[in-house]
Amino acid sequence: MIAILFSIGLGLASRYINALPNFIVIHAGDTLWAIMIYFLFRFIFVHKSQDTAFCLSFIFCFFIEFSQLYQADWINTIRDTLLGALILGKGFLGVDLIRYTIGIVIAYVMDKWFSFLNKRVKHGKP
């Protein structure tokens, strides 16, 4: 849950803090959104494997991005709200798929690393 809240905070900060470098402003929001989605699936499916969260994150993120190709009035009305734009986005960008991939891989590797460290601590290894 902490990872979810942390990624939300960083993602919002990357969108609304003007002092950040342009590269961060352009790429961090979508990358952090994908990180949040990964940890959200880990939270919801706590007894499933990290691989399950990894796969579900890709399916969900890519589904949301490809859904942006659908531009009906009713869904665009939702996308025009702040929450709708944050969750559903506004328009399809192929580069977002790369950003999501990077974010999911970062979250997965971090999750694996922390799990490894946690197992070492439980077994009394330094």
Image (spheres, rainbow, N blue to C red):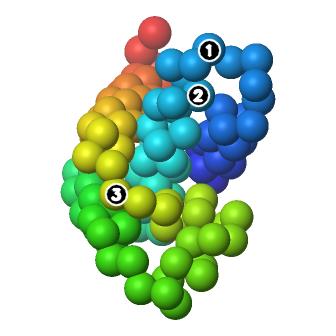
Judged from the image, the secondary structure of the residue bearing numbered disc 3 is loop
Q: CA distance from mark 1 to mark 3?
A: 24 Å
Q: Which mark is residue 50?
A: none
Residue appearing at x 69%, y 43% in the figure: 12
Which label was assigned to residue 92?
3
What amino acid does circle 2 point to? Val
Numbered tag placed on residue 25 in the rendering:
2
Dot 3 amino acid type: Phe
Query: In the image, is residue 78 above or below residue 31?
Result: below
Check disc 1 and give the amino acid type: Pro
Q: Residue at x 55, y 39 (%)?
A: 29
Q: Position of residue 34 (x, y in %)?
A: 43, 47
Residue drawn 49% across and 61% down?
Answer: 89
Are dots 2 and 1 in contact, CB under 8 Å? yes
Residue at label 1? Answer: 21
Q: Which is nearer the eye, 10 or 50?
A: 10
Q: Earlier in the sequence, mark 3 or mark 2?
A: 2
In this view of the protein, which residue sits in the foreground, 106 or 65?
A: 65
Residue 115 seen in this snapshot? no
Q: CA distance from mark 3 to mark 2?
A: 18 Å
